[in-house]
Image (cartoon, rainbow, N blue to C red):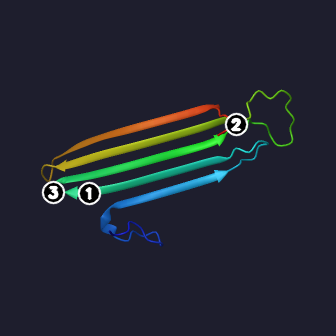
Amino acid sequence: MTPISSRDGVPANPRSLAWVGFEASFGDGFLARPEQRRQFKLNADRSLKVNSHDLTLFGSGYYGSSYIPALIPTGVSVPGDTIDPRQHDRTHNSLLIATDTWRLSEKQHLDFAGFFRRMGLTCAPISATV
């Protein structure tokens, strides 16, 4: 199997018509309560040429979680804070897109496309045992 990318950012096989990207980030933010934020993102694209069809597949995904910092700046006392310190959010998002360009002749073509998307957000206190 030929690798999709190499260290210098140039595709190892430029004819593969594909790429993949991944990003991860972590942090606690700048507020009094650490967020413990974790985010992961993945994107991929692949194009294929099959007879008179040009097919393209694209996918994107995201997952993130953190504790809600309650928007209290560092060094500021807020009596009776109304945010539960166990408040936690978890979110995800995924997208898949497929397209097909069918070349009927040099001057005519048909385009087909479809997509699937799913999103979710959970925002609730978590138990101390988790």
Residue 40, position as x, y percentages in the image: 54, 50
Above or below, comparing residue 76 to residue 7 in the picture? above
Residue 127, position as x, y percentages in the image: 67, 34
Q: Mark 2 — residue? A: 128
Residue depicted at x 86% and y 29%: 79
Residue 69, position as x, y percentages in the image: 72, 39
Q: Is residue 88 left or right of residue 45?
A: right
Residue 46, position as x, y percentages in the image: 33, 56
Query: Camera-side residue: 67 or 112?
Result: 67
| Quarter of the image with the C terminus in it | top right
Q: How far apart are marks 1 and 2 (CA)?
A: 49 Å
Q: Foreground mark, 2 or 3?
A: 2
Q: How far apart are marks 2 and 3 (CA)?
A: 58 Å
- Check contact, mark 1 vs mark 3: CB within 8 A: no
Q: Is residue 108 left or right of residue 2?
A: left
| Amino acid type, callout 3 | Asn
Q: Mark 3 — residue? A: 51
| Amino acid type, callout 2 | Ala
Helix, strand or loop at mark 2: loop
Helix, strand or loop at mark 1: strand
Along the polypeptide, which appears first: circle 2 or circle 3? 3
